[in-house]
Image: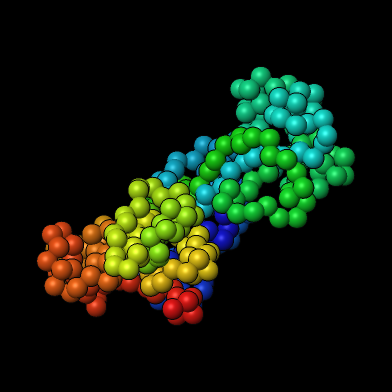
Amino acid sequence: MADAARSLLDATGYGTSPASLLAAPALLGAPVKVFALPERDIPMYAAEGGLHLAVTGSLSVDEASVSVPVALELDVGAHELTLFSSEPRVRTEGDLHGARVATPLPNLVRRHLATATIAARRVVPLDPVEHAVVLGIADAVAAVVDCRTDLSGPMRAMRRLGTVRTGHLVVVEGRAPRDDVTRLVRTQVLARLRAAGTASATALLQYDCPSGLVEQTTGLVDPGRPPEVHPLTSGWSTVRLSVERDRTEGIVERLLDLGCREVITFVPRDHRVGHRTHGEGGRGSGAESLPSPRGLPPEVAEAAPGRPAVRPDRAWTRSPSAARGR
């Protein structure tokens, strides 16, 4: 979650990396001060008026004993609170009757167990929890993990019993601005977070592959919409699909290993905030701005209805790995 928050702030220009300087906003008024705080303390700081805005995990907000308004629900920083155990007698979630469960989010776990009518002996507040079962502190743990990556360390040897709740990054509100300048800056910060938190969640991927590999390559991802497949000559096809941004490089490497060519990633641009609108520059965003499949005669590509020809000013980025695979 911390990595996702840093990437989000870098994309908006409020981070500390060189990439953040490229997106630095032209703010009016006072500068924005960004603090890194412990995840569990952020809702408390916001509720007590120490912050104007805070980026944190939705599970931390749900866990907190204070109420803070959520200003934005973002599409980045996916994570989940999941039950694990390596005890031989604990094979399913139902085996947690009379068990000890260690977790950094005890309130959420207690509510989940109560809803599932599981009477655990004790829910132990503990962070980190990776070694709790091995040390005999608990019979199971409820840990926050990235559901899209492999487990690491002692968690690899544990059985997944079930998911307590899934979460993502959110922006919560704290102290209300008392002057017009701060109010304006806050509005600009929210606008950029909204744009970066929605447009940076997914990328569009296009590649050429042998037609016999279309099903295998499209099975590498679970796209939000069906993939587009355009047959080419000589038994090849061009495929377009959407993919989670943080998985793009890994999938590109896999496509190149399978023999795919012309792998291109396209990052959708959010035109609601911080960019020109559709009518101001002629550039669109999304699938309609993808180029025509390669391998077709130029006059066919240009004449195809609803299919724009390739333009040099499109916001395309060729993967650094693509040159190696071509």
Q: Eyeballing the image, is 14 above or below 193?
A: below
Q: Can residue 23 be seen from the camera position used here? A: no
Q: Residue 12 at what x, y percent from top left?
A: 41, 65
> Image quarter for residue 3?
bottom right
Residue shown at 54% from the left, 40% from the top: 166
Is residue 284 left or right of 203 when viewed as pictured?
left
* Residue 204 position within the rendered picture, expressed as x and y whole percent measured from the top left: 36, 60
The quadrant the N terminus occupies is: bottom right
Side (left or right) of 38 relative to 19: right
Residue occupying image coordinates x 18% and y 68%: 301
Q: Is 247 situated above or below 163?
A: below
Q: Residue at x 34, y 59 (%)?
A: 240
- Left or right: 268 with respect to 92? left
In front: 231, or 303?
231
Residue at the extreme top? 117
* Residue 230 visible to the viewer: yes
Front one among 202 and 35: 202
Residue 181 in picture, x, y percent from top left = 33, 61
**Which one is nearer the viewer's eye here, 156 or 173?**
156
Is 127 placed left or right of 291 in the picture? right
Number of numbered labels in the structure image? 0
Give residue 290's position: percent from left, percent from top.
Answer: 27, 64
Q: Quadrant of residue 288?
A: bottom left
Q: Residue furthest front?
A: 234
| Colouring scheme applied when the structure was drawn | rainbow
Image quadrant for the C terminus? bottom left
